[in-house]
Every structure is written in C-alpha cells, then in structure tokens.
Amino acid sequence: MASNNHKHDPNVLHPHISPTSMYVKVAATLFALTVLTVVAHHFHEVLGVLAAPIAFLIAAIKATFVLLYFMHLKDDNNMNRVIFASGFFFLLVLLFFSAIDIWTRVVEVSPL
C-alpha cells in the first residue's frame, strides 16, 4: 500500500501543492477569456486595426495562465523559467532576422 507522504520518495520531485479550487478558477478564467475572444471577433469591424493586437493580447494572457498554472512554472525553480523563456527569445530572434530579410530585399524587374 502506497503512502501519501512523498517526503522521502526519490521518484517524486515535488508533490502537487495546488488545490483543485485554483485549477477550477484558472479554467473559468480561460473560458471567460475565450468568450472575450469571440466577442472581440464579432466587433472586429468596430475595432478596426486594433482587432488583431487585442486578439493577440488575449491569447498571450491565456498562454501565460496555462504556462504558470497548468505547466507549473509558477511553483518551479528559476532555471526552468529561464530555459523556457529562452525559447521565446530565440523565436523573437528568428522573427527579427526574417523581418530584416524581407525589408531589405531589392525588387527585381523581370527582363521579359
């Protein structure tokens, strides 16, 4: 019979310390943000050029909740946070160099 005490179990890194009520609150927040995304989509003509930035902002907030609570980065050590954030840094580097490549292209005229 297994014990619920994981203090001396070498196979358990850390027990789940988050209560179920926190997961329910985070899930409700994610559902509310999803509804907000749908509402923002219905008003995309009114929002004009702000429609895409608002949608990306809502998506970034939802991704932050998922990363912090469901992937447990909130309770994890700083090294794992840095490693995870480095992925976003290199994504920004990739996008930066891709944008520089596109912006500095010379328009070629077809000789035909």
Image (cartoon, helix red, strand yellow):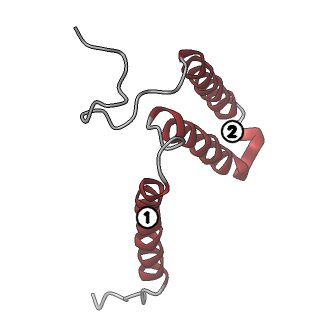
User: In this view, which residue lies farthest toward the front?
Assistant: 8
- Where is residue 109 drawn, in percent x and y? 37, 89
The quarter holding residue 51 reads top right
Up/down of 35 relative to 70, above or below: above
State which quarter of the image contains the C terminus: bottom left
**Residue 70 place in picture, x, y as percent:** 47, 32
Disc assigned to residue 86: 1
Asked if the residue at tag 2 contacts the one at tag 1, i.e. Cβ–Cβ closer than 8 Å, the answer is no
Q: Residue 97: name its quadrant.
A: bottom left
Residue 100: where, in percent of width, then height?
47, 81
Separation (CA) of disc 1 from disc 2: 33 Å
Upstream in sequence: badge 1 or badge 2:
2
Q: Residue at x 57, y 37 (%)?
A: 65
Q: Residue, x 36% and y 15% (percent of image)?
A: 4
Q: Residue furthest top?
A: 1
- Numbered tag placed on residue 19 in the rendering: none
Looking at the picture, tell me which residue is in the foreground, 47 or 64. 64
Secondary structure under badge 1?
A: helix
Q: Which mark is residue 44?
A: 2
| Residue 8, position as x, y percentages in the image | 31, 31
Residue 74 placement, left or right of 102: right
Disc 2 residue type? Answer: His
**Quarter placement of the N terminus:** top left
At label 1, counting other C-alpha atoms closer than 10 Å, the crowd grade (few under 14, some 14-19, many 20 or more) is: few
- What type is the residue that disc 1 sits on? Ser
